[in-house]
Amino acid sequence: MSGQYTYPRLTEEVEHNLLPGISLKRLDLFLEGPYNEYDLSSVLDRIRLDDEQIVNMTIWSAPGIEKVTFDEATPKLKGDEAKPLKKGDLIGGSWGQHWVKVEINIPSRFRESDEPVVFEFDPGCEALICDITGHPLHGITGGPNSTINAYPGYVEDRRIKHIIPREAVNQGKYECYIEVACNGIFGIGINGYRHHEPDMNMKYHLARADLVQIRSAAHALKVDFQILKQFVRSPQGDKSPVSRKALKAANEIMNVFRNDNDRLIDETIVQGREIAKNVIGEGLNDFEDDETKVWAIGHCHIDTGWLWRYIHTQQKIARSWSTQIDLMTRYPEHQFTASSAQQFQWLEKLYPTLYERVIQAVKDDKFHPIGGSWLEHDCILPSGESLIRQYLYGQRFFQEKFGWKSNIAWLPDTFGYASQLPQILRLAGIEYFFTQKLSWNNINVFPHSTFNWSGLDGS
């Protein structure tokens, strides 16, 4: 067209509806997949070292499958029964108990940036990071832990990073101990499936033992992108304006991302996070004007007895709750709730220094004991007296250790609820009852999510 109007030959953006068959499939290629030399996973680390001269490890394996304390294990790690450990080595078999001493020489180039330095340790099973005095710092969950494949590269509940204190990075030396328990998060079911019978011939190898300086903004963008994907693949799908907006934002993030050099990497990650803010940023809604407010409080449901023995429950408690204390240290706004007086009693006896930190977090109103019962009990098999004793002993423990009694009954995973329970709970000083198991019934659809429950006596 001639005349006074001119048009650019190249436009940076084309405004059109995204084709779901293409745009949805793209989402699975940005975090993992066949293009990992070019996707976000290629820039998560600034430095990664897999070097036995940098990370020196010694392992001692207990002769049986009983838990061995830190005080019992440390002399063994200095004796003839200890042996060197390196990546790829066999740690042990089903239910095995092991202790590892880690000594890390941190090169000077890790001090050139303020970015966090982490030790990635993946034993393929569960583990507990301890300091040089044996105090639990946080849990480790190696993978895989199930047959679930939510997206390419997905490993359920895998947590393998231990942040090295900055003081140790500056000194160039770091030491810690790791208690390794040879079981997955759901025990030792055959082929990793939680409801299969135990596989007593499982083998666990050390899959990773790397020293890494991470690119924090890239990890943050990874979380942003995962949240956007969850919005996109919500049940509402393309019927939801938020889902459509999330799909557009996710594709824009992939469009702007470049990994040609460090400058472009950092710049395009910042751009990507700004794009994500349009969908999941704090300024998206004016919360003061919302009619509904939701508080997210952490919780990890630990069966006191399920696919493992009591000693494994005790280890899971220490791993889970030390991780929460670690999160509270790094994120002061973090809140967590846990039930079962029995589990608190085990922690007090077996991990006293961790118990002291939990009690302090309770006093700081961050760690919230809940439930008022000795444990999350069954309601079908126990007698009425047994149910009463659950709350008699539980509330007595809460009063003695925390200075108050719980006013909330916490039974999220109980298969059926006794009709006498409201009366028992009222007499125990409890006003509220929480569960989510009612919604699982595949025969009778329970019609309510909030309701008033009356017992046989009218309580």
Image (tube, grey):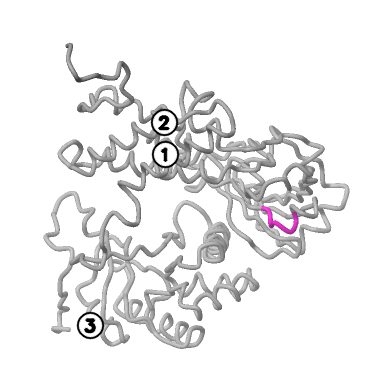
Q: Measured along the vertical axis of the image, is residue 286 above or below residue 41?
A: below
In the rendered image, which residue does mark 1 sit on? Answer: 272
- Evaluate if marks 2 and 1 touch, with contact meaning CB atoms under 8 Å apart: yes
The quarter in which the N terminus is drawn is top left
Q: Which residue occupies 15% across, 71% down?
A: 451
Sooner in the amino-acid sequence: mark 2 or mark 3: 2
Verify whether residue 357 appears in magenta: no
Residues at marks 2 and 3, CA–CA distance in whole angstroms: 61 Å
Residue nearest the observer in this picture, 360 or 215: 215
Q: Residues within 10 Å of mark 3 (few under 14, many from 20)?
A: some
Report helix, strand or loop for mark 1: helix
In the rendered image, which residue does mark 2 sit on? Answer: 256
Sooner in the amino-acid sequence: mark 2 or mark 1: 2
Residue 443: image x %, image y %? 15, 50
Residue 45: image x %, image y %? 60, 38
Residue 225: image x %, image y %? 39, 40
- Evaluate if marks 3 and 1 touch, with contact meaning CB atoms under 8 Å apart: no
Majority secondary structure in the magenta region: helix
Q: Which residues are magenta?
A: 164-168
Residues at marks 2 and 1, CA–CA distance in whole angstroms: 7 Å
In the rendered image, which residue does mark 3 sit on? Answer: 423
